[in-house]
Image (spheres, rainbow, N blue to C red):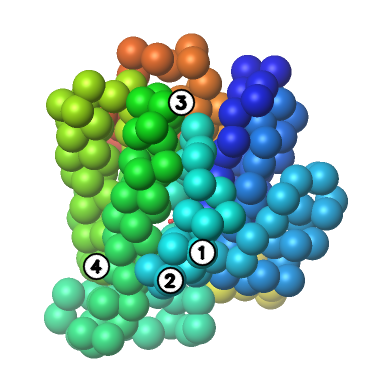
């Protein structure tokens, strides 16, 4: 019961990593408010685990205003909702051919959504002067990704904004912590368009993790475990930091001697 009595808002909680975080927080005694832009799906998952659900599109300021009215004070906010830009098909996302509209659409969810989530959290935590904000960035926020420029840019900006929020809150004298998590490949529905359903699915899966030292995808529950730690009072002295969860990927590079 490491989160007993703490009110916890999780965005993008209908499936994947967000769902695993909501489930883990619930198991640890948190009072979970699961949110997602897919209202039907988040209601369904909330009914399954027995928590509260709200429709919230993180890119829409008016949805955050509604959350302020529904959940005026909060202890933990996880800004998890994110998109790659490939959800509706394989459009170009390299820096030469990406359209401005596609670039902006990814930033609207990943970066604007995280900015609005942090702003909501600060305002809803400052009266008590304590809380934990967890921003789900990515390994892609730490390295360049030639075919996913907007995703990489938005995730890098989340990493930096996390540190700004952490310093700002400390400067105000609040024990409101803010940290980022940087997962590499975690097997969630986000990967489905890239893995496909054909006979070569296993080969594609293996190829995607061939360079990962632990040679497998990570699991959503493993990201959730880190989120529980950062959300809990055990991490009371941890702020402004970035935690990678990548099977060892960033420990070396292609240039590392064997
Ligand atoms: N899966 C990975 O390998 C991986 C790696 C690094 C980082 N991440 C990050 O982890 C987070 C979760 O990824 P996932 O793999 O679980 O993705 P997913 O696609 O399986 O789930 C994302 C969820 O977010 C919701 N969502 C999308 N846009 C939204 C919006 N505007 N407002 C509210 N909800 C919205 C979706 O409806 C969905 O329920 C994302 O930020 C992603 O970038 C994932």
Q: Do the residues bearing badges 1 and 2 touch, measured as CB atoms within 8 Å?
A: yes
Left or right of 185: which side holds 172?
A: left
Tell me residue 25's x, y (percent). Answer: 65, 33
Residue in the foreground of this view, choosing between 105 and 183: 105
The CA distance from mark 4 to mark 2 is 28 Å
Tell me which label, 3 or 2, sits earlier in the chain: 2
Say what secondary structure mark 3 lies in.
helix
The CA distance from mark 3 to mark 2 is 28 Å
Q: Where residue 149 is drawn, which disc sits there?
A: 4
Tell me which label, 4 or 3, sits earlier in the chain: 4
Tell me which label, 4 or 2, sits earlier in the chain: 2
Say what secondary structure mark 4 lies in.
helix
Tell me which label, 4 or 1, sits earlier in the chain: 1
The CA distance from mark 4 to mark 1 is 32 Å
- Is 111 situated above or below 123? below
Tell me residue 159's x, y (percent). Answer: 25, 43
Return the residue at label 2.
62
Few, some or many residues within 10 Å of mark 3 (<14, 14–19, 20+)? many
Left or right of 49: which side holds 244?
A: left
Q: Where residue 66 is drawn, which disc sits there?
A: 1
Figure quadrant of residue 53: bottom right
Return the residue at label 3.
230
């Amino acid at each position: 019961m490491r989160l007993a009595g703490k009110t916890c808002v999780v965005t993008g909680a209908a499936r994947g990593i967000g769902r695993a975080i909501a489930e883990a927080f619930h198991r640890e005694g948190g009072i979970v408010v699961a949110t997602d832009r897919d209202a039907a799906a988040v209601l369904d998952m909330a009914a399954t685990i027995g928590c509260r659900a709200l429709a919230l599109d993180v890119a829409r300021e008016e949805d955050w205003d509604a959350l302020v009215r529904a959940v005026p004070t909060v202890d933990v906010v996880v800004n998890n909702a994110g998109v790659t830009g490939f959800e509706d098909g394989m459009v170009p996302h390299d820096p030469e051919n990406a359209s401005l509209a596609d670039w902006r659409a990814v930033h609207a969810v990943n970066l604007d959504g995280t900015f609005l989530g942090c702003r909501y959290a600060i305002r809803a935590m400052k009266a008590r002067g304590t809380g934990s904000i967890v921003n789900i960035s990515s390994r892609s926020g730490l390295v360049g990704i030639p075919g996913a420029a907007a995703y990489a840019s938005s995730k890098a900006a989340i990493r930096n904004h996390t540190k700004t929020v952490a310093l700002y809150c400390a400067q105000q004298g609040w024990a409101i912590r803010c940290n980022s998590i940087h997962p590499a490949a975690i097997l969630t529905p986000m990967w489905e368009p890239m893995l496909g359903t054909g006979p070569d699915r296993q080969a594609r899966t293996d190829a995607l993790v061939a360079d990962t030292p632990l040679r497998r995808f990570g699991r959503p529950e493993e990201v959730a475990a880190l989120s529980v730690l950062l959300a809990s009072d055990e991490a009371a002295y941890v702020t402004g930091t970035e935690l990678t969860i990548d099977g060892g990927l960033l420990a070396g590079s292609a240039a590392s001697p064997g």
